Image: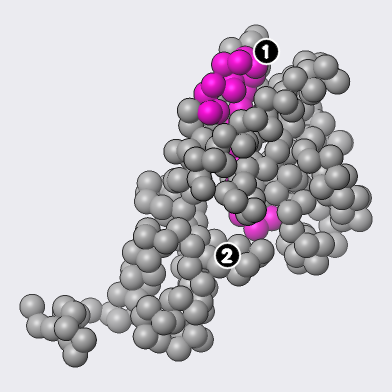
Amino acid sequence: MEQNAEGGEALPTYAIESVDKALQILVMLRERRRVRVVDVAEELGVARSTAHRLLATLAHRGFVVRDPQDRSYRGGPELLGMGAIGEVDLRAAAGEHVRALSARLRETVNVMVLEGASCRFLDGVAGERPLGTRVRTGAVLPAHIVSGGKALLAELPSREVDALFGASLRRITPATIVDVAELHEELRRIREQGYALNREESEPGLSAVAVVVRAGPRAVGAVAVSAPTQRLDDDGLAVALDELHATARAIGAELT
């Protein structure tokens, strides 16, 4: 194999350089979890505009997702589906703690991440109680209708929430928030109280409560307990919240 001027292996004569650059970005993500446009430009020796176009193309196909908080990129759902990178660390760190939480409460527990205006369910454990709720691993739902999605939206500046949703919100059930101003008020309450609720907003008869998981100061995901609404009353909510906060701290400790 020939070498290029920098001593690395040269591309085959039939290679497409832009494809090679895109694959190098995926290798970078495997090693770093997150990259910025400037990182890609420097690493690949290309202009920032070229790095941005490469990342935008990968994002269009679902291989990377842009974080609106700091404009970095992480592995997207297509890469997750191949078991490569992205939120694998969160899933691995959460696994044991999520199973333990579900066993203690005997309710369903899910781990979620924010993907733009949507919320992806990374992992979950079904509760043992009768009339339980289902695990949604792999599902993608509008972020404003699920507790974990709302908990993570509350971490964003208001202008970024507006950019994600525009002027209106999709209605799923009669309880779904469809007014953006009402969503902002809900997010304000979530920031004050430190947890988010879903009261039959995604499915009639189902309620859920979620808190964010932090790696250091950054919110990297959310963990939620879901149950039939009648079981997540004030007493059930208080018990679940104590356990959720402890579990979120334990998962965060694994990530730092």
Q: Position of residue 75 (x, y in %)?
A: 47, 57
Question: Whole-percent x and y of residue 180?
Answer: 87, 55
Report x, y in % for residue 181. 91, 55
User: Is 120 displayed left or right of 21 in the figure?
Assistant: right
The colour scheme is one colour
| Residue 125 in which image quadrant | top right
Image: magenta residue range: 97-117
The answer to whether the residue labelled 1 contacts the one labelled 2, judged by CB atoms less than 8 Å apart, is: no
Is 113 covered by the magenta stretch? Answer: yes
Residue 240 shown left or right of residue 173 in the figure: left
The residue that appears at 65% across and 9% down in the rendered structure is 130
Query: Residue tagged by mark 2?
Result: 66
Query: As rendered, which of 44 and 176 lies closer to the eye?
Result: 44
Q: Please name the residue shown 79% across and 35% down the image.
A: 197
Residue assigned mark 1: 131
Task: Please state if 36 lies on the left or on the right of 43 as rendered.
Answer: right
Quadrant housing residue 207: top right
- Counting every numbered tag in the picture gives 2
Q: Is residue 90 positioned above or below 79 on the image?
A: above
Name the mark on residue 9.
none
